[in-house]
Image (tube, rainbow, N blue to C red):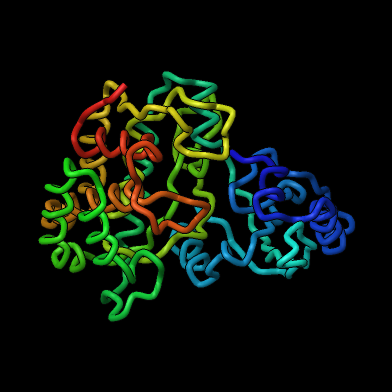
Amino acid sequence: MASAADFFARYHLSPEARSLCWSFAKTKHPHGNIRESPSQGFCSFTLQLNHDSIIQFRPAIHQIDLKIASAAYATHSSLAPFTTLIGTVIIPTTNTNQPTSSLLVYSMTLLPGISLTTLRILQPYIDLSPLITSFARLLSTTWNASLSTPPSKPSHRISSSLLPRLLLLHSALPPRFHPFTSHLLSALPSILSLPWTLTHGDLVPSNILVSLPPSLPILTGLLDWAEAEYLPFGICLYGLEELLGESTGGDGAQVHKYPAPGSVFRYYPNASELRALFWGELVALVPEVEAVRERVEMARLLGILLWHGFAFDEGRLDRVVCEGRDDEELQRLDVMLLGEVLN
């Protein structure tokens, strides 16, 4: 995860920015117990308030869609934070062309548990079966809360550009991925006909909260719904891959980058059994998924390509990954699509 200092430097905020955020929080909660969160995100600065809420400061380019946040809370209850916008802080910058910047301030309920990243450090060989089944339950809830009809004109970043993005992937990814992009282009109409469900946009281990040891791990919450939007069911299954394996090695000093530069993703030895467990649980909870399983699997492949085929580039998500610059993401595509682990 990024540090607070990383956040303020990344957005060219002046040295007093941190104290201005603190002042805002103290003004709002003069008698509250306020402290900096030990875990900071890439696009935000977070303070913890007492033991039940957080105050988060975000640049306007990473603002939270409150309708989506409300839908996440309504759908998943305790697994998503209740989020409100409580103000704006004007911050001087170090950028002479833009002397001030604004940070939007949100109040959110504090979710329980520890991150999957932390769990893997504390208990690297723990049985993940309970986490897999709880993830299936999360997605069954998502399915049951799907839109009654697909949106006629999707307006969010990914949903409004599925075809252009897939065409761009087809033209710009290395040729070994063309069979997948070509097949998905043909299958896109059938994928779009799946139920449209609320899809978390950044299912990485640091955003996945699990129960505290010594309990077996179950899902206790998902952080950072800022990139969430409605997409065809199955695209969300890019997140399943994060539970079936992990990235190791690389430059651990660059903690704000995921996957870390030079890291390698590998599936766990029992990944096939865990995947079967997931599908068994999901179909048991939502039997109608079985009838569209093939289309859902195609949507899963599309989700993997969308999430690992475009470079993050500080949130722009408009450049296809390329060899020599984004090798960690390409290695993930090799493993997830072609079944190859490249050392």
Q: Which residue is drawn at 60% across and 53% down?
A: 43
Quadrant position of residue 128: top left
Q: Where is residue 158 in the image (x, y as percent from the top left)?
A: 36, 64
Name the foreground residue: 134 vs 225: 225
Pinpoint residue 103: horizontal percent, then vertical percent.
Answer: 70, 64
- Tally the marks: 0
Pick the residue in front: 92 or 193: 92
- Residue under the point 26% across and 76% down: 149
**Left or right, 8 with reference to 172:** right
Residue 134 placement: quadrant:
top left
If the image is split into quadrants, where does the C terminus sit? top left
Which residue is pictured at 17% across the width and 40% down the height? 176
> Which residue is the extreme one toward the bottom?
152
The foreground one among 62 and 233 is 62
> In the picture provided, is 268 more to the left or to the right than 83?
left
> What's the residue at 56%, 65% (across, down)?
64
Q: Residue 129's x, y, as percent? A: 34, 30
| Quadrant in the picture for the N terminus | top right
Q: Is residue 139 visible?
A: no
Q: Which quarter of the figure has residue 146? A: bottom left
Q: Can residue 45 be seen in this view?
A: yes
